[in-house]
Amino acid sequence: MHDLDELQLSRRGLMAAGAATAAVSVSPPTAVAQDGPDAPVTAKVAFTVNGEKRSLTLDTRTTLLDALREHLKLTGSKKGCDHGQCGACTVIVEGRRINACLSLAVMHEGDAITTIEGLGSPERLHPLQAAFVKHDGYQCGYCTPGQICSAKAVLDEIKAGVPSHVSADLTAAPKVTEDELRERMSGNICRCGAYSNIIEAIAEVAGGRA
Amino acid sequence: MKAFAYERARSPREAASAAANDPGARFIAGGTNLLDLMKLEIETPRRLIDVNGLGLDEIKPTRDGGLRIGALVRNTDLASDKRVRKDYGVLSRALLAGASGQLRNKATTAGNLLQRTRCPYFYDPNMPCNKRRPGAGCSAIGGFTRSHAVLGASEACIATHPSDMAVALRLLDATVETVRPDGGERTIPIADFHRLPGDTPHVETALARGELITAVTLPRPLGGQHAYHKVRDRASYAFALVSVASVIQKDGSGRVALGGVAHRPWRVEAAEAAMTQGAKAVGETLLAGARTTSQNGFKLTLAERALGAAMAQARA
Ligand SMILES: Cc1cc2nc3c(=O)[nH]c(=O)nc-3n(C[C@H](O)[C@H](O)[C@H](O)COP(=O)(O)OP(=O)(O)OC[C@H]3O[C@@H](n4cnc5c(N)ncnc54)[C@H](O)[C@@H]3O)c2cc1C
Ligand code: SF4
């Protein structure tokens, strides 16, 4: 893909050059400090993403999702609703799945973050990625990175004994059943409706593990 | 989203006094409600005080046989705690019936208590709302009211409180512990914590400005059968239309509280005297004074039947 996103068009440069020449002036990214009540505030944050240390200086408003996608160019995690409702932005932070869209990047100082890019690669798929391919656990694929990160955490949660709404006995160890997987995956919406294949994919991996 | 300064609080007391001295300041815990509202500019803090690092994330036994739950304990951790699962099942059940796995991993005890209504007009900045802008008027009254309150509402606001956890805490007679800006501490019985809307629906709790919740305490276990029946439009991941938290003893006596019907968890202790006489008898007192619209009257039927289901389950 072309590095279009690296280009920053300067409006004034464009106008000065006029329409006759196709020249585009590229201005270096500068931290623009403005005064006034709405002036952006920036802050530094450092965390580990997929095993790599990253340090960023960000507008405090930047969500973890935007930090990953827009600043670190890890575009696997998706922005669906941007309000914690669809689960497309699900990433794993300190071993737990969260909605990256409802969390500020600056609140993750020192955290270890895993995104879909960190779970596996096209050459070395994570078992869940391979199972999603095998079972057709998607159609358009937009929700898939979130589904897979969520699924990874769901299996860990069941192992750790975290109960769910459908666990019949709160004091017993939860089991990997279809009902359990459906309930636990309910925070990940699939607009194409690939749910039954998603559950098959997760169940296969869980079965292989147990 | 409006720009804001961000800082990490170093002690509960410091957090409280910083927030009290700056009307533009807000605490942030899990952020799952506050950030959502900030994106819509329904909340516009100029300063966020992060309370995650204050060490308020432990669950400890109390001297009188109860449990003290830190304000920053995550919903997942509270629902999974062995003591809570064994002795306060209704609380685990209520938490697990709320939101999603991802959200529960972030959501905190205090944040959950303080989450704001899901009234669709509250979420729509183009519509007048007394909760968003006192005196602006209430768009829900005369509008779409299927999800709105049938008990304790006012001419100013008919919103419901969306928390499932809070319904269980009300049932269990929890107390909310706080630190005030001057460093003083106080405890607020959960029954007095959430307010009815009256003519100030924007004032939702008993907390003063800057007051920080440090813990929620549960009294000693009640025994009995614990259940949380949540009736919603989907089988999972939806707010309650009506919910019933119950603890019922072998002889049929017990406690019940409702969610989804009022501006706060709804419990009427006097109604519990009729527990052994069935759902209708309890409903007579519990639902007394209800005011419905043409769209939400079904909530009364639903409440009574969910109550009946809880009682039947406890007998089984
Ligand atoms: C898609 C979706 C579905 C949901 N479904 C449900 C559901 O079915 N049932 C349900 O009950 N909930 C549901 N929720 C709401 C969820 O439970 C809340 O967002 C969550 O509990 C809020 O906790 P938090 O720690 O993230 O709060 P935050 O967003 O961090 O804070 C909320 C408020 O509490 C204040 N605050 C936080 N900590 C303190 C403290 N220690 N002292 C004083 N003030 C404090 C903040 O200033 C803020 O005003 C849902 C949310 C979403 C996004
Ligand atoms: S019911 Fe309450 S929250 Fe909803 S529009 Fe009316 S005043 Fe606002």
Image (tube, coloured by chain):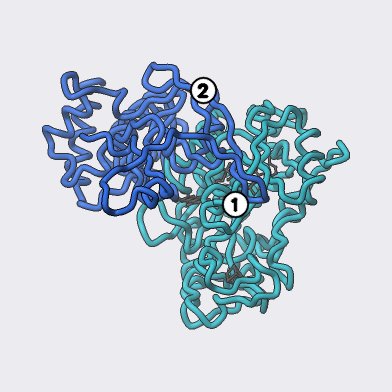
Q: Chain of mark 2?
A: A
Q: What residue lies at 39% left-to-right and 40% top-to-bottom?
A: A168
Q: Which residue is mark 1?
A: B115
Circle 2 crowding by C-alpha within 10 Å: few under 14, some 14–19, many from 20: some
Q: Color of chain A here?
A: blue
Q: Which residue is mark 2?
A: A46
Q: Chain of mark 1?
A: B
Asked if ligand 1 lies within 8 A of label 2, the reply is no
At mark 1, the secondary structure is loop
Chain coloured cyan: which letter? B
Q: Is residue A132 left or right of residue B305?
A: left
Q: Is residue A8 above or below residue A175?
A: below
Residue B58 picture location, percent across and down: 64, 27
- Residue A182 appears in view: yes
Residue A114 picture location, percent across and down: 38, 25
Quadrant position of residue A90: top left
Q: What residue lies at 67% left-to-right and 34% top-to-bottom?
A: B7
Asked if ligand 1 lies within 8 A of label 1, the reply is yes
Q: Is residue B37 above or below residue B177?
A: below
Q: What residue lies at 34% left-to-right and 35% top-to-bottom?
A: A6
